[in-house]
Amino acid sequence: MRKIILFLQLILLYVSSLAQSRQITGRVLDASTNKPVGNAAIIKFGTTEGTVTNQLGFFSLTIKGDSNSLVFSCIGYLTSKLDIPEVDQFKVLLKKDFRELIELDLG
């Protein structure tokens, strides 16, 4: 009887862990032009798990219950850390980082 109860508890634990993950999708756009930002990195804060946007700025990522923030970064743009919204689809606007352009050495 104990083995059956233990087995049922393990199944419930497994099912509850699956229920805590969800798929989110979104699009990363340039804040000033509203054009897509391709190859932007989206990383779950505090981990190395993440994804990259396609050339049209779209991304898809599986979020587990313990994740609460995402970090968006791309060369030429300021890095943004955002709380994961309750909705499963959203857009992110990245601002250009003009400091990188100023530091460019042409000589």
Image (cartoon, helix red, strand yellow):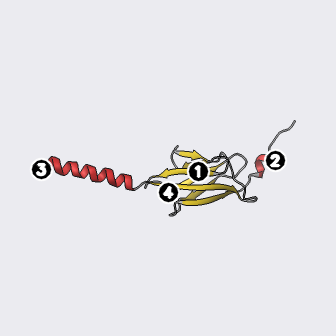
Disc 3 versus disc 1: distance between alpha carbons?
A: 47 Å
85 or 97: nearer the viewer:
85
Near mark 1 (Cα within 10 A), the count class, few <14, some 14-19 or many ≥20, is many
Q: Amino acid at mark 4?
A: Asn
Measuring from the top left, give residue 16's x and y in whole percent.
34, 55
Disc 4 versus disc 3: distance between alpha carbons?
A: 39 Å
Task: Say which quarter of the image contains residue 104.
Answer: top right
Q: Earlier in the sequence, mark 2 or mark 4?
A: 4
57 or 40: nearer the viewer:
57
Q: Amino acid at mark 3?
A: Met
Near mark 2 (Cα within 10 A), the count class, few <14, some 14-19 or many ≥20, is few
Q: Quadrant of the C terminus?
A: top right
Residue pictured at 52% horizontal, 63% vertical: 87
Residue indicated by mark 4: 68
Above or below, 42 relative to 105: below
Q: Earlier in the sequence, mark 4 or mark 3?
A: 3
Q: Earlier in the sequence, mark 1 or mark 2?
A: 1
The mark tally for this picture is: 4
| Foreground label between 4 and 3 | 3
Disc 1 versus disc 2: distance between alpha carbons?
A: 30 Å
The answer to the question of whether label 3 and label 2 lie on touching residues, with beta carbons closer than 8 A, is no
Residue indicated by mark 1: 59
Secondary element at image label 3: loop
Secondary element at image label 1: strand
Measuring from the top left, give residue 95's x and y in whole percent.
71, 56
Numbered label attached to residue 1: 3
Q: Earlier in the sequence, mark 3 or mark 1?
A: 3
Residue pictured at 51% horizontal, 45% vertical: 49
Numbered label attached to residue 102: 2
The answer to the question of whether label 1 and label 2 lie on touching residues, with beta carbons closer than 8 A, is no
Q: Earlier in the sequence, mark 3 or mark 2?
A: 3
